[in-house]
Image (tube, rainbow, N blue to C red):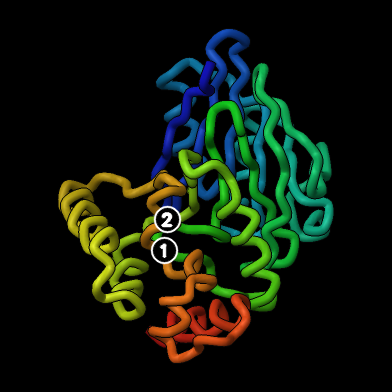
Amino acid sequence: MTLELVTIPCRTDNYAYLLHDAASGDTALIDAPEAAPILTALQTRGWTLRQILITHHHGDHIEAVPELVAATGAQVLGAKADAHRLPPLTRALTEGDTVQVGPESAQVIDVSGHTLGHIAFHFPESRYAFTADSLMAGGCGRLFEGTPAQMWHSLSKLAALPPETLICSGHEYTASNLRFATTIEPQNEALLSRIARVTTARAENRATVPSRLSGELATNPFLRANLPHIKALLGLPDAPDAAVFAEIRARKDKF
């Protein structure tokens, strides 16, 4: 059975996620931006938090870990490569490791680029991928530490997941990301339709994440840097994919 997913708005534009297995009662949290809404979500449902899965070291993803551990005794799992700047880890992870929530195993994927040591968690049976600030709804994270080639490699791994995968990213940046996307592909009908849906959702104060990978592949310019017509639009018809990605990222940084 699919793990139950709860999306929790935190801070001003962050998201945390709870995963719950009804049969075993096992509950995991992906990232910890703010304790109060997470504890409220747990208490409302009568769930006991057993694990906190950390994607990367930025404060808006780990700030609440100490308070949540103190309140719940949850174990903390995060990247071995990032352990020196994460809260104390119960278990340090590398790419290829698996994490268990109830009966389901998640695959750990190295998605360095936004930061070095950023990881994602893919739950193939439930069709969830927790990508935080690597692959985002309509965009990708700014390259604070990694290179464009690293980020393109990371995004290519995520793009290869099954298209029905739900991409559970870390921020409500979708509207801005899609506005930028129109500067790359102003005639993309799927993109224009998505903007209309996102505009309605935000007017109603509804979250625009998670998003389906198939929709990202159709509208997210950072996943489309390998397409010949994108290269042509950018005046880079013969450039390597990573170089085209770098150009798109550079434009977004100035947007």
Position of residue 177 relative to residue 16, above or below, is below
Residue 78: image location, x then y, percent: 74, 46
Residue 225: image location, x then y, percent: 51, 73
Labelled disc at residue 122: none
User: Can residue 13 be seen at all in this image of the molecule?
Assistant: no
State how far apart marks 2 and 1 are (Cα).
5 Å
Position of residue 235 relative to residue 157, above or below, is below
Callout 1: few (<14), some (14-19), or many (20+) C-alpha neighbours within 10 Å? many
Would residue 3 appear left or right of 105 to someone viewing this image? left
Would residue 165 appear left or right of 55 to someone viewing this image? left
Residue displayed at 62% across by 68% down: 114
**At numbered mark 1, what does the secondary structure look like: helix, strand or loop?**
loop
User: Can residue 62 be seen at all in this image of the molecule?
Assistant: yes
* Residue type beneath disc 2: Glu
Is there CB contact under 8 Å for labels 2 and 1?
yes
Q: Which residue is mark 1?
A: 220
Would residue 81 appear left or right of 219 to someone viewing this image? right
Residue 212: image location, x then y, percent: 41, 45
Q: 250 or 5, which lies in front? A: 250
Q: Quadrant of residue 111?
A: bottom right
Q: Quadrant of the C terminus?
A: bottom left
Residue displayed at 72% across by 43% down: 108
Would residue 45 appear left or right of 1 to someone viewing this image? left
Q: Which residue is mark 2?
A: 216
Residue displayed at 52% across by 85% down: 247
Residue 67: image location, x then y, percent: 61, 40
* Residue type beneath disc 1: Asn
